Image (spheres, helix red, strand yellow):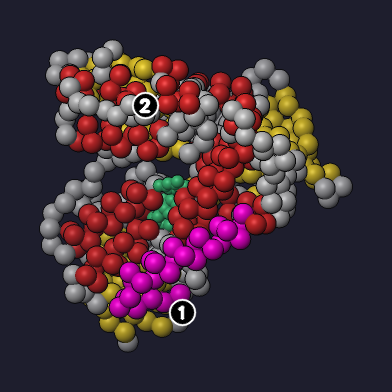
């Protein structure tokens, strides 16, 4: 029987990062990934990287009208989605080869792992043992109660990357980060896009002012948005289109689409693992852990989307760092507070630290300082001055406690707020700093004078 110091289950960002740190620490490590050639997991193969490749390409089309106004001739700009797919595949291959080089020296098995007992797993019929395990099996799309994925008319985010032509008209069910990103992509490349979101706002985890601004901006750009929308019926028409009925507070909508994208969240991958054999507890589908990321079995750690922390690749990286260091005998806590949340729609949305709801719940006195992009020369140069930067500041100490942005490059600029929060920077201290001009970043500096 093969024996290792540590077996890492799942080859996504969390699993790969953990395996790399353990190897560097001199441990014998096995990494088990369910699918052949799927190193990098959801993030690299069907998540963060392909979506951002698609969005970056479509962003040029989105700017078409503005650059034309500036004298650039781009009348016949159109997207060949097959070529974009090839480019995406070649990017993934490139990043995968870099990742594989980092994993050199680690035994990698492509098979489904399941526990036989607390220190033995079954990998393709072969038994393997380890003193410790890290579970990083990630997540998969959350099924919709009325819309089962059929890969033709009802798709999840995974099947989007198999499209061979740009659709004419689509319905996106779910207005969270993934839904809003795909809405941006498809709208930019000429598709007629409708979003039906079940809750009262888009990006429901963000502050309300951000969500309403995003809804307004989407509508302004031509994306139809319905909130409090509930799918009631769907019918395939002539094997060509799908007709969908959904109820909204004002009226019932009945319309026909090329396909529906279902993006209503993610659920942890735990079914194959036989966790009861390893005495690992699960609550509401998520593996439970303590602050050191140990499961109910202290020799087994769990990280990433499979536990109830924000389902983000950078969270999986952070947790890989915490869990592996704890396994190697330090005592680090997972950081839950200063996690940047980023949505790469247009305008981009990002937040970090405490939001208004958290501050109100914790009865912390805070003041809001809000600066609009329309005061930014750089945003105007870039052709879109929609959105704002909002900082939440402790009334007593002037320390920045949280920040939210909607607008150009919010997903980059949010890290300035992250550092400010981590360093307990005051608004006054930001005013004393020198920010380059003309930049989007100087809007943050400007905010400090409000
Ligand atoms: C469309 C989309 C866009 C996204 N965009 C972003 C973004 O821009 N930024 C961001 O931070 N996050 C983004 N995410 C989320 C991000 O992809 C996940 O948070 C991240 O991949 C989680 O990492 P992980 O290591 O926990 O799991 P995963 O990346 O899901 O990897 C888990 C791996 O475990 C394997 N596995 C499962 N069960 C077993 C088993 N029993 N045995 C062996 N192997 C198994 C799976 O095949 C998989 O490869 C996006 C997700 C999607 C779907």
Q: Which mark is residue 438?
A: 2
Tell me the chief SS of the magenta region.
helix
Magenta stretch: give its range.
Answer: 84-110
Q: Where is residue 345? Give x, y as percent.
A: 51, 36
Q: Secondary structure at mark 1?
A: loop
Report if the beta carbon of the residue with label 1 is closer than 8 angstroms to ligand 1. Answer: no
Picture residue at 21% right of the left edge, 70% below the top: 24
Residue visible at 24% across and 77% down?
28
Residue 141, magenta (yes or no)? no
150 to the left or right of 92: right
Q: Residue at x 50, y 66 (%)?
A: 93
Q: Mark on residue 362?
A: none
Q: Residues within 10 Å of mark 1 (few under 14, many from 20)?
A: few
Instruction: List x then y, in percent, for residue 176.
Output: 51, 36
Q: Quadrant of residue 59?
A: top right
Vertical arrangement, residue 262 with respect to residue 10, above or below: above
**On residue 124, which mark appears?**
1
Give the quarter the ligand 1 occupies.
Answer: bottom left
Residue 336 lies in quadrant: top left
Query: Which element type, helix, strand or loop, lies under badge 2?
Result: loop
């Amino acid at each position: 029987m093969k024996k290792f110091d540590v077996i890492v289950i799942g080859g996504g960002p969390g699993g790969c990062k953990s395996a790399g740190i353990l190897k560097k620490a001199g441990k014998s490590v096995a990494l088990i990934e369910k699918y052949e050639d799927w190193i990098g997991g959801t993030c690299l193969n069907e998540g963060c990287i392909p979506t951002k490749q698609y969005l970056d390409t479509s962003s040029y089309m989105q700017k078409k009208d503005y650059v034309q106004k500036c004298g650039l001739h781009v009348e016949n700009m159109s997207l060949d989605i097959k070529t974009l797919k090839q480019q995406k595949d070649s990017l993934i291959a490139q990043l995968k080869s870099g990742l594989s080089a980092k994993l050199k020296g680690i035994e990698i098995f492509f098979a489904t792992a399941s526990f036989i007992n607390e220190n033995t797993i079954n990998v393709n019929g072969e038994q393997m043992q380890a003193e410790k395990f890290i579970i990083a099996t990630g997540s998969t799309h959350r099924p919709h109660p009325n819309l089962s994925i059929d890969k033709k008319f009802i798709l999840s985010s995974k099947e989007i990357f198999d499209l061979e032509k740009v659709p004419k008209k689509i319905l996106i069910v779910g207005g969270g980060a993934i839904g809003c990103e795909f809405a941006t992509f498809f709208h930019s490349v000429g598709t007629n896009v409708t979003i039906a979101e079940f809750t009262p706002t888009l990006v429901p985890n963000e502050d309300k002012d951000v969500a309403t601004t995003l809804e307004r901006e989407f509508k302004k750009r031509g994306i139809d948005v319905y909130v409090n929308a509930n799918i009631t019926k769907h019918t395939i028409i002539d094997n060509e289109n799908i007709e969908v009925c959904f109820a909204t507070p004002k009226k019932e909508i009945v319309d026909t689409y090329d396909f529906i994208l279902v993006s209503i969240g993610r659920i942890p991958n735990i079914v194959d693992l036989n966790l009861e054999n390893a005495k690992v507890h699960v609550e509401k589908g998520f593996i439970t852990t303590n602050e050191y990321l140990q499961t109910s079995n202290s020799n087994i750690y769990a990280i990433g989307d499979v536990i109830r922390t924000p389902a983000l690749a950078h969270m999986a990286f952070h947790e890989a760092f915490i869990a592996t260091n704890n396994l190697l005998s330090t005592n680090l806590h997972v950081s839950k507070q200063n996690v940047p949340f980023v949505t790469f729609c247009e305008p981009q949305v990002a937040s970090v630290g405490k939001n208004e709801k958290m501050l109100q719940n914790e009865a912390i006195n805070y003041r809001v300082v809000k600066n609009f992009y329309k005061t930014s020369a750089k945003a105007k140069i870039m052709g879109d001055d929609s959105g704002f930067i909002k900082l939440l500041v402790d009334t007593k100490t002037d320390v920045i406690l949280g920040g939210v942005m909607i607008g150009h490059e919010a997903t980059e600029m949010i890290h300035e707020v992250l550092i400010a929060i981590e360093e307990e920077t005051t608004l006054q201290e930001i005013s004393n700093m020198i920010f380059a001009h003309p930049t989007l970043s100087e809007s943050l500096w400007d905010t400090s004078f409000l």
